[in-house]
Amino acid sequence: AVVSTQSTGSVNVPRNLEKILLTLEQNGLYTVGLYRVNANQNQMKSLKNKLLINNSDLVIDGHRPAVLAAMVKMFFRELPEPILTFALYAEFMQAAKCDES
């Protein structure tokens, strides 16, 4: 349940997602297997509960990059509709077949 958004160009990005991504960019880019490594489930639950309770002022300092990356994956996994929507599936498949020349 992400309510707060910050306008980034023409796309609304949830403020806490942006905060997590910026932290990962600053502190986690050189972490091997960042989005592949499993995160501690207790830390994930704790951070998710903090998000649900106090959505506007999430403090993410001190969390391992793997936990933050797992939160990003969870956000996209739990979207009601995928970013690459089903309505545009045929167009995505056609674009994937295009030759890059």
Image (tube, rainbow, N blue to C red):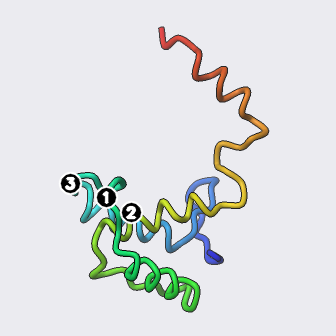
Classify mark 2: helix, strand or loop: helix
Query: What is the CA distance from the residue labelled 2 to the residue labelled 1?
Result: 9 Å
Residue where numbered disc 3 is placed: 30
Q: Amino acid at mark 3?
A: Tyr
- Is 58 situated above or below 85? below
Crowding near the residue tagged with mark 3, few <14, some 14–19, many ≥20 C-alpha atoms within 10 Å: few
Residue where numbered disc 1 is placed: 37
Front disc: 2 or 1: 1
Identify the residue at the far top of this view: 101
Residue where numbered disc 2 is placed: 69
Crowding near the residue tagged with mark 2, few <14, some 14–19, many ≥20 C-alpha atoms within 10 Å: many
Q: Quadrant of residue 7?
A: bottom right
* 3 or 2: tag closer to the N-terminus: 3
| Residue 25 placement, left or right of 20 | left
Which residue is pictured at 35% across the width and 68% down the height? 39
* 3 or 1: tag closer to the N-terminus: 3
* 2 or 1: tag closer to the N-terminus: 1
Verify CB contact (< 8 Å) between mark 2 and mark 1. yes
Q: Amino acid at mark 2?
A: Ala
